[in-house]
Amino acid sequence: MRSRSRNSLFVGAILLASTATVPAAAAPAAADGAPADGADEVVVRGARPVEQASSGTKSDTPLVETPQSISVISGADIRQFGLANLNQALRYVAGITPESRGANAEIYDQFKLRGFDAPRYLDGLRVFDSATGYANPQIDVSRIDRIEVVKGPASVLYGQSSPGGLVAISSKLPLDQQFYGAVSGTYGTYNLYNVDADVGGRIDQNVLWRLYGAVNGADTQQSFGKRSRQTVSGAVTIGAGSDTSLTVLAAYSRDPQNGNYGSAPVFGTLFANPNGKIATQFADGEPGDFFRREQVALTYIFTHRFNSDWSFRSSGRYQYASTNLGAIYQTGNPTDATLTTVGRAAYATDETLNNWTFDNQLSGRFTTGPLTHQVMVGLDRQVAHSTEIAAFGDTVNGIPVTTINVFRPVYGTSPVPLTPGAIGVPGSYDAALRQTGLYAQDQISWGGLRLTLSGRHDWADTENGVTQRDRKFTWRVGGLYMTSIGVAPYVSYSTSFQPQLGQVLRSDGSTGAASPSLGRQIEAGVKYQPPGTQILLTAAWFRIEQTNLLTAVPNTLFSTQSGKVRSQGVEAEATVPLPHGFTARAAFSHQTVKTIEDADPANIGQGLIGVGRGNAAFNLDWAPEAGPLAGLKLGGGLRWVDKVYAGTYTGSYAPSAAGNITNTPSYTLFDALLRYDLGRANPSLKGLEIGINATNIFDRKYLTSCYLSSVGWCWYGQRRTVQGTIGFHW
């Protein structure tokens, strides 16, 4: 058994920093010549300040003038909190049900936004997941410059978006600086390690370059699990600072080990077990389980300014991902009334994913009488193709998979399937999506009024054993009024269209292609930013309805489709700089998500598995700008997640409460950080920074979610972790 306390004490005793990358000594500019986000950051491309966002309208629009809820996570936030993945980055965003699979699946970005799965976009282009299995790319945080969470339907600009919204990620791109660099090393609980490097500069006046990457990994919270990754990215910008520029970005990532993608049984976690609680380090598989992934991507971004009012932008990316895995997993149901042993089964897959995405936009500005128009016309194309060979079964090479005692597990009793064929006759799956969209938008300004009008038409073809063609028009209208005191009430209505490549298991046992998901939202809210300040307060009420929602069926590659789901709630976020170097940030949400129409009457009125009822977060940082403590930063915060719907357990030995609706309990966690810029204390140490990050500092044991509809699976959240980095920049 791994010693957690020994690692924590060791990390806390050494000088470490709170982030994987560190501030720069000078204030660089982005490749387009705009001032950088955070004047002292070498790792931030950032032409946009945190109070401005581009993802909601595909134009740089102040958040206070955008008639939609958008949350921004800057590069400085990623470093400050020592975030290791997108799941962790979204912990502090209102409306998020975070880390669906807890500590068991850090290799995937699994979360809910306003009750729904949310797609990811990188540099404005969709990051596709496998339609049938596990070949889902993950963007390493060493590549991320900025994250914007767009809430509510965004199909009108992106084509592929759920009604809950989307997560827009920006890559680090070359900076307009002669030469810069940063290197850092991190160590933490569970033998976490990360070595990160970032260098770049100017080849000549109009050619910029940047190269960065990381080597990282850790033992997992579950016994004998490990994860490791090597990733590298490079970018070149030609024509920087001119009217015409081209940036080419290449990225490669290899994950030779991806940890334990398992679960713990419901008895001994959510439900009582007379034998006690199951340990958080319980692993349901075998030491020989494997889970490997490889990713390659090539992106281009071309821009041309015709004049000060009109410009053209074209971007595209090819993405490849492959995954192969073989594992033993617990089926969730006890084998007898002692509730000590559960059954197990085996699965194995071999998958590939190829996709091409392109987006072209012509934008401009003109006036008609008292009205100022910021217009955009765009054409995009998305093509995704995934293949999979997979098998699920209860034998490996003809040998039955053994059960496991969850309180005294004995490993090495079952062989691990090295190929799908070791389990039985594998299934072969081939899915493809082709979608073309034509869209237009007009942002109209008249005094304090901001009116956004958007429309889009999509042509989508899906193939998944059956060919399906869909055509759909989506639209959005939003109005906001800016008052002279900084108060901005707004209202918006938007629709979504999402072709789906999943295979549907119908109530009569037949299968077929999934129908597109359609959604609509009405949102009303108010934003407040006092003129001349960085204070930003937002509050919103929303109501979303979605049809044809997909829900995965455990132990299969199929899903079911709900008739109609409604999500309704309120959200609020605040960022408030305070006197004497303090900054406070807060987020709160409460939502009700339930099925309102379904072919099965028993589902009507019930929630969606894995969706919580709300969340809240509060952070307070102190960073004095002068005096003997200048260069120090202390911070603390809490995260609260309301109960999460888990379904109804109907398996063997169900407790007396079976048949009632079950939720995982709410939980509250506390985090802390410390950073210190040694160069502020001693000029000879300029560029050196140290610090410590700790999450779940009171080491609370908690569940992030459970899946009880046909099995009894639960997932523990991450126990206390302490990590840090020592870094140097120039």
Image: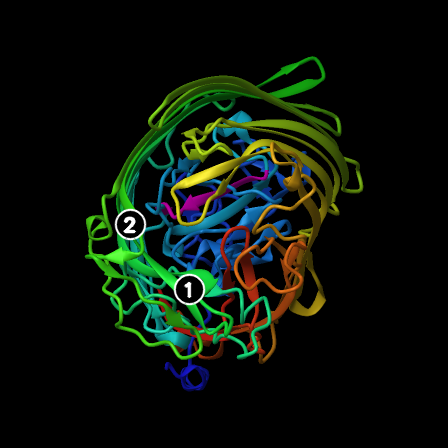
Where on the picture, by quarter, is residue 331? bottom left
Pointer 2: what residue? 233
Q: Is residue 134 left or right of residue 36?
A: left
Question: Foreground: 725 or 230?
Answer: 230
Residue type, mark 1 in image: Val
Q: Does residue 364 appear in this view? A: yes
Residue 76 locus on image (x, y percent):
50, 58
Residue drawn at (52%, 60%) of the image: 652
Q: Taking 406 as reference, is 393 above or below it?
A: above
- Mark earlier in primary sequence (1, 2): 1
Disc 2, SS: strand
The residue range painted magenta reads 164-175
Q: Is residue 167 magenta?
A: yes
Question: Foreground: 178 or 534?
Answer: 534
Residue drawn at (56%, 51%) of the image: 610
Where on the picture, by quarter, is residue 241? top left
Q: Does residue 536 appear in this view? A: no
In the rendered image, the quadrant that contains the N terminus is bottom left
Residue count near mark 1 (Cα–Cα under 10 Å), binned few <14, some 14–19, many ≥20: many
Disc 1, SS: loop
In the rendered image, the quadrant that contains the C terminus is bottom left
Q: Taking 379 as reference, is 720 above or below it?
A: below
Q: Are marks 1 and 2 in contact (CB under 8 Å)?
A: no
Pointer 1: what residue? 22
Residue type, mark 2 in image: Ser
Q: Which mark is residue 8?
A: none
Which residue ends up furthest to the top in the rendered image?
368
Residue 257 locus on image (x, y percent):
28, 61
Q: Is residue 475 magenta?
A: no
Residue drawn at (50%, 37%) of the image: 560
